[in-house]
Amino acid sequence: MRAPTLRQLRTFLSVIEQGSVTEAARVLGLTQPAASQQLRELERITGTRLLERAGGQVLPTPAGQALLEPARRAQAAAEDALAATAPHRSGETALVRIGTGATACIFFLPAVLAAARKAMPGLQVTVAIGNTAALAPRLLAGELDLGLLTLPAGPARGLSVTPLLEDPFIALLPEAMAGTKKSITPEALAALPLILFEAGSHTRAIGDAWFRAAGLQPAPAMALGSVEAIKPLVGAGLGAALLPGMALRPPPPGTRALALKPALSRQIGTVLRREKVIDRGLRLVLQALEKAAR
């Protein structure tokens, strides 16, 4: 069964308020035949007469009286819907749901979001923390609008991936272990007690591959899930770590950052669903990301 349209209900209500089809058509900006057609169609859908004439005025029948309140609620709901979306239409506000890793969230994203919110004070942001493998499916499902992820992002079908920046890895050593070194090899680093990311993380996989390329597979003395948990342990002299460079600007007290030989880096990029609609809020965040990455 077809449902009445808002246009038909609006015309019906206007006729009741104005007491005339001709006057209702004028108020609504319709021709009189067009208004009459909408009323006939509404009566056909409801299966009953809704209006009758009395003393030169159009009045509701009992069925029309029964329709008045539901019609008013429907019109009010439509007006509420327009009011709710008005700030989005005008570009005053937007919601951007971002998925990213903890390191990028702590050390890269704050300045980006500050710039985006300066351009749009009404911008609302939610951030989901996780690794690339966990966040990419949420982008495909439409649960997130934007991923700021370590690449590759897995199977690219359905996703649009744009490389954004190279983040070099750095060895973080206690000052006593670092001595006068300025760089360190996999062999030298593997000889030290290691404090690494927990197994299964993308960052740990990148570091493990670097060691394997040198024929090494060192077992860490400690494994943790957070760069912020690793850094103070290095500062306390408990071991050396292999960390993304963006997390070490500057290195914490009591530590030294050494370049890796051979160099190692990870690529971070933006990831969106291919058919994603880019509204003003998302566009501002993307522009702020590109500017921060330069």
Image (cartoon, rainbow, N blue to C red):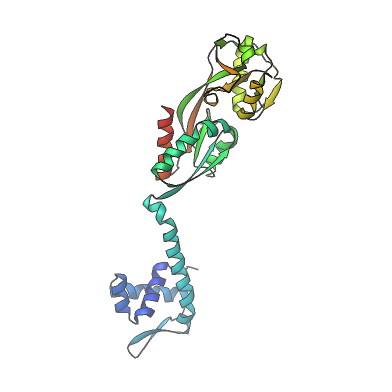
Say whether residue 50 is left or right of residue 35: right
Q: Where does residue 119 sit, x and y in percent of width and height?
A: 39, 42
Question: In what quadrant of the picture does the C terminus appear?
Answer: top left
Tell how many labels: 0
Identify the residue at image location x=42%, y=35%: 288
Identify the residue at image location x=64%, y=18%: 240
Question: Closest to the observer: 134 or 246?
Answer: 246
Q: Where does residue 19 sit, x and y in percent of width and height?
A: 35, 82
175 versus 39 height, above or below:
above
269 versus 253 height, above or below:
below
One can see residue 279 in this view: no
184 versus 111 height, above or below:
above
One can see residue 41 in this view: yes
Q: Residue furthest bottom?
A: 55
Residue 49, by quadrant, is bottom left
Residue 211, by quadrant, is top right
Identify the residue at image location x=64%, y=21%: 234
Q: Where does residue 143 sit, x and y in percent of width and height?
A: 54, 44
